[in-house]
Amino acid sequence: MAVNSTSQNTKTNSPRTQSFEERQNDHRHSNRINSMTDNDVQHNEQGTSTFRQQTENYPNSNNNTMHNQEGNDYIFLKRGWSTYVPLETLQSTPKKEIVRQEAICELIYTEEDYSRDLNLLDELFAKPLRTAQCIDEDRRDIFCDIVFNNYLEILSIHQDLSRELRDYQNICRARSTGRFVDQVGNILLRHVYRFMSAYAEYSPHVALAEYIYKKEAANNMLFSNFLREKEKQPECRKLEFRHYLMLPLTRIQRYPLLLGSILRHTKEDHLDKHNLTLCLEEMRDVHKHVDALTKVERMVVRLYQISDSLEFKTEEYYADLRLGEPGRQLLFEGRMTRRRWNMGRPDVMEHYVFLFDHYLLITKSKRNGGYVIWKRPIPLELLRIRDDTADLALGSQQRSNQQQNNNNTDASAEALVESPSSYINPQLSSTSLSRSSSSTLILQHLSKHGGEYLLVAEDAHRCLEWKQMISKAKLALGQTHPEHKTFEFRSLSDTDIKNKVFKNKNSLIVKLLKRLKKKN
């Protein structure tokens, strides 16, 4: 069965990248293995084919080229539909149907691969870890529940699906000389309804699972050795534990592509058209729902990572950041620089800035990947951006509003009040603000222990993004927690001062002016 290939013309690329003529020319190689594939595609008790098991212990089996222990190449084995059909059938079949059969075959054998790898996650990692001594017994079960979650439910779904797809493929091969698989949508519909609940529980949790096991491996040498030894097993194919943990997330993203490829090459009047359309719509809904949940969970994990990596420069700067609170958000982050004079020469200091929904942190990056908080955390209520360009634009707009409403001074005064959460007017277009090519951002911490910090962004566009995000964060905080409002800025024009101050006969300024007039 293992024939050593000595031909220099043996191709190593996937059969899907070959043209129709190349597949015909290469068909003579597939004839050598037709006798093997006819006998070895029977299922074992686990629902996987003997032919597939012969390749699963080889690294990079998806490249379709097997190697023996001496490193020599075996015969080039293709897994596509054209491998199993006679040359006469291949020549007489329309190209569109060939592509469709190849897409169906790809769906089936990748489903087999997926089920096999989920089974490896169970047999090689999950079950042994339940009894391993590398993690303390009192927290071992909790750790495994967090890391592996409901993988057994997903394994059961895809073992059933893979077995039914392969069984139907074998029936089609036995009853048709062309070995055409007429439909798969009816089989998928029987299983796809189970996807939503299973993947909605597992996929968003993957980011937290990855964070937990990596943190454990960094602090627990025994657990790190356990993973390393398991990854060395030949059935792992030199793939890391993370690969198997992330498989459900990557697989659910691939289903719309696989089904879409089959559907595009299925005729409108084909009996499988309707079922495939329903399956594709359901898969897209699952993918969309899972993706939305995953983004939320990744935000939580990112907050955990930041919280673990933060250090306060001194105890004087300490503040309870409450990064683990439910609903906490990281709105923006990035590198900025600060210029200072050192020994009479300008020196550039790098900073990493975090904008949360309640604080802004200016930190310095550590070599080990952590962050040291450089100055006191700035509450958004006490954060102000000093920007001359924005001030001029804002003042120009306010003077225009004052002229239009000159007859209604009360309404004008209310229009001139600016909330601290919107020092940069959100209504201003990005074009008017981006006229300034400056990438300098001046932040003011309005506090007894605060200060003014001049930071430089990567470019003017990045600086504008910082201004907009800070403005939106302050505005959202003011709307969500109005009780945190400490003070407000009021921009007054000459006309406003005249109308509001001098018309009030009881105002202190009016009284002082009257006294001075009497003395004179």
Image (cartoon, grey):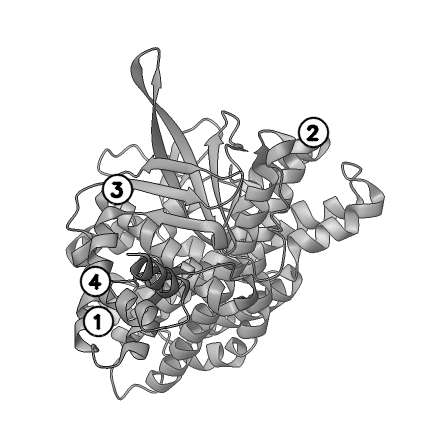
State the residue position of label 2. 221
- First in sequence: mark 2 or mark 4? 2
Does dot 1 land on a helix, a strand or a loop?
helix
- Left or right: residue 314 versus residue 415 is right
Judge by depth and name the residue closer to the eye, 44 or 268: 268
**Disc 4/disc 1 C-alpha distance (Å):** 20 Å
Q: Nearer the viewer, mark 4 or mark 1?
A: 1
State the residue position of label 4. 429
Judge by depth and name the residue closer to the eye, 510 or 31: 510
- First in sequence: mark 2 or mark 1? 2
State the residue position of label 3. 11
For badge 3, the amino acid type reads Lys
**Disc 3/disc 2 C-alpha distance (Å):** 44 Å
Residue 402 image label: 1
**Disc 2/disc 1 C-alpha distance (Å):** 69 Å
Q: Which of marks 2 and 1 is in front?
A: 1
The residue sitting at 76% across, 36% down in the picture is 134
Quarter of the image with the N terminus in it: top left
Crowding near the residue tagged with mark 4, few <14, some 14–19, many ≥20 C-alpha atoms within 10 Å? few
**Up/down of 188 relative to 369, above or below:** below
For badge 4, the amino acid type reads Ser
The residue sitting at 66% across, 62% down in the picture is 152
Q: Nearer the viewer, mark 3 or mark 1?
A: 1
Count the numbered circles shown: 4
